[in-house]
Amino acid sequence: MADHKNHAGHAEEHFREKHLMLDPLPRGQMNDMVMESMHTTSWKFWVVFAILSAIVGYGLFYSWGTMIAEGLGIAGVNRPSYWGIFLVNTVFWIGISHAGTFISAILRVFKAEFRRPFTRAAELMTTFGLVQAGFSVFMHMGRVWLAYWLMPYANQRMLWPNLHSPLTWDLLAITTYLLSSTMYLFLPLIPDLAMARDRSTGWRKTFYKTLALGFRGTEGEWAHLRNAMNIFAFAIIPVMFSVHTIVSWDFAAATRPGWNSSIFGPYFVVGALHSGMGAVIMVLAVVRATMKHMKYFIRPEHFDAIAKLMLIISMAWAYFFFNDYMVQWYGGDKWTHQLLHFHEAGPLGWMWFAMLIFNIAIPWAVLWNQKWRSTPWIVFIVGFFINIGMWFERYIIVPISLSINRMPFTWRMYEPGVEIPLGIGTLAFFILLYMGASKLIPLIPVWEVEEGQMAHELKKFGRETVVSVSELE
Amino acid sequence: MADNISGNENSGSVSLLAVFPDLGPAADAIEKLRDLGLSDDQMNVISGIPATEAMLGRPNQWTNVPRLAAGGAVLGFFGGAFLTFVSPFLYPVPIQVGTQGIVPGPPTVVVLFELTMLGMLLSTFLGVFLDSYFPNYRPMEYVKEISDGKIAVFFICPGENCEKFTKAMTALGAEKVEAAEVFHL
């Protein structure tokens, strides 16, 4: 009898250690932990911050300024690859941005409880990723000061944008997604900004006070927020799907070998989720390792859950890739065969094989194992490889596929120029924005964590102890 | 439901605040206040988590957010309709793209969808601001313990009976019962 009691006690302790939702701390203590994580900054942070600032200064602003002054000629885009790394990066960053919505909205709709501590960390990636995507498109534009020509109003010559063009749909879709994901980031942040306001002094107090908008937590304020978050969670999902589908139509709507595919929409969406989930797990591993108290909030169970999703998405990506490849290969079109052969055996064939290894072989080899899935540094490495693999995929789709076409006399390999520092600049700017936000914005939605902890309890069925979740909403 | 309640000094009524450690005692306190003769309009609950009306035993909160969202969607749809159905005819010579009509079917669906969603989500966001009177930097009744997970019940008690209310709240587990103070948040 005593043994059974001991066993039950150990089981409960094991559950509490393992699951954040079963290991509650007083709300005040959790607030203090989150505030301390924002206020504690080591010298290493500033060193990395300075290095990234220098990279952004050179890679993004100086290089872009040079390109504006000298023209697109210093970039590598030229016949036949008029689309190069700028558009590779655009697709890549839009892909990264999908993870935030996926985690925050889809998992909220399906009431996946493990999402609670890291929804905000993922949502921040959406907003900051879209900023880089916007930069990359503007770089591609060349004459960036004329970007307003895209806006849907008549210009000086009474010309309206051509709404038949997927590029105009891109503008509408990306603008809708950027605005809605930023609003969706902000709404659940308001209660945490109010918490930070109550615990701050000086300039931080003014900052949080301004952003908290006077939120107190009245019944009315919560009711309005709850309603709005529900609407956003449902409505932003089709917007997310539409964005990457429309991005895929930039390619698929052209009658080019390799591009003209009816499966490109879902293939791109799954690819976006693949790289996005990989990026989320990398960010969480870094946040957990470098920020104070984050080991309490972000636990191996969260890596395990995200890694399972990564494995499923990797399988879905493999399915779509093979589906697309199979149909193109079977079609027997001469130029398509030429292109497929060029992908695999051309000068950059190693990239095609690396793409398959990084996106399929590595995730499948590692993520089947629960212990490995729950180990932050292992899933960080897998996430890193997936992102490299997905960047390669976009590189293969854009400049490599453009290198050969139906007019062999124009064939020429794409050689990037200023695109390289600009691409590195956007990556550095993304990390820089994230680092800055981690010191200004509570990365953990404490009220959502507390709500989840209230809903979870351990229940006994016979001699077994199981986790039980109540539906509070 | 009034988000702000305040006592009327002329009539001798006072706005009190009772802070509870948990939802259960706060819900009991609300019921007790009703028993003592207060109506739901004379009380308000402030909490650090989204406690639902059912949890607190309170009437449903009226919110315009879904209606505003629907209104925004309609506006967005008409915006999209203007772009797709009207703007092509604003050219001196409408543009013909391939074999597509001047108002092409599938692209019209795309534009209508994006602008409808944009209208809906923007108005949902603005709806929270309008319904909650955000931003609001005026001094308001508040206690900082709320963001630490406490539940505060504000209520108006007629001046002569305040002691009775205070005792009732304390008996139900209130950590403190005091006159509500206003703060610059």
Image (cartoon, helix red, strand yellow):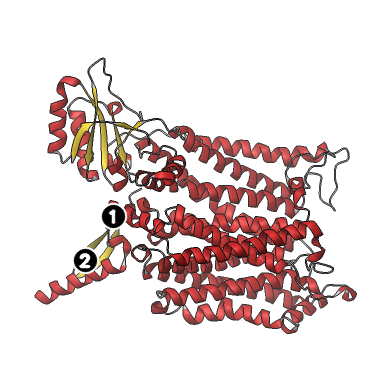
Look at the image and tell me whether residue A263 can be seen.
no
Give the structural element (helix, strand or loop) at label 2. Answer: strand
Kindly identify the residue that appears in the image at 66 percent across and 64 percent down. Answer: A59
Q: Which residue is mark 1?
A: A29
> Please, what is the three-letter code of the amino acid marked with disc 2?
Phe
Lateral position of residue B49 relative to residue A65, left or right: left
The answer to which image quadrant residue B131 occupies is: top left
Kindly identify the residue that appears in the image at 53 percent across and 61 percent down. Answer: A99
Tell which circle, 1 or 2, labels the residue nearer the N-terminal end.
1
Give the structural element (helix, strand or loop) at label 1. Answer: helix
Reply above or below: A2 against A297.
Answer: below
Pick whichever, B104 or B163, lies toward us.
B163
The answer for which chain carries disc 1 is A
Residue farthest to the top, as pictured:
B10
Crowding around mark 1 (Cα neighbors within 10 Å: few <14, some 14 to 19, many 20+) is few
* Image location (x, y in percent) of residue A221: 39, 38
Kindly identify the residue that appears in the image at 67 percent across and 38 percent down. Answer: B79
The answer for which chain carries disc 2 is A
Q: Which mark is residue A461?
A: 2
Residue farthest to the right, as pictured:
A409
Pick whichever, A436 or A411, lies toward us.
A436
Residue farthest to the bottom, as pictured:
A345
Look at the image and tell me whether residue A391 can be seen.
yes
Count every numbered label the image shows and give the total: 2
Residue farthest to the left, as pictured:
A1
Reply above or below: A146 against A220.
Answer: below
Crowding around mark 2 (Cα neighbors within 10 Å: few <14, some 14 to 19, many 20+) is few
Kindly identify the residue that appears in the image at 86 percent across and 72 percent down. Answer: A406
* Image location (x, y in percent) of residue A215: 40, 39
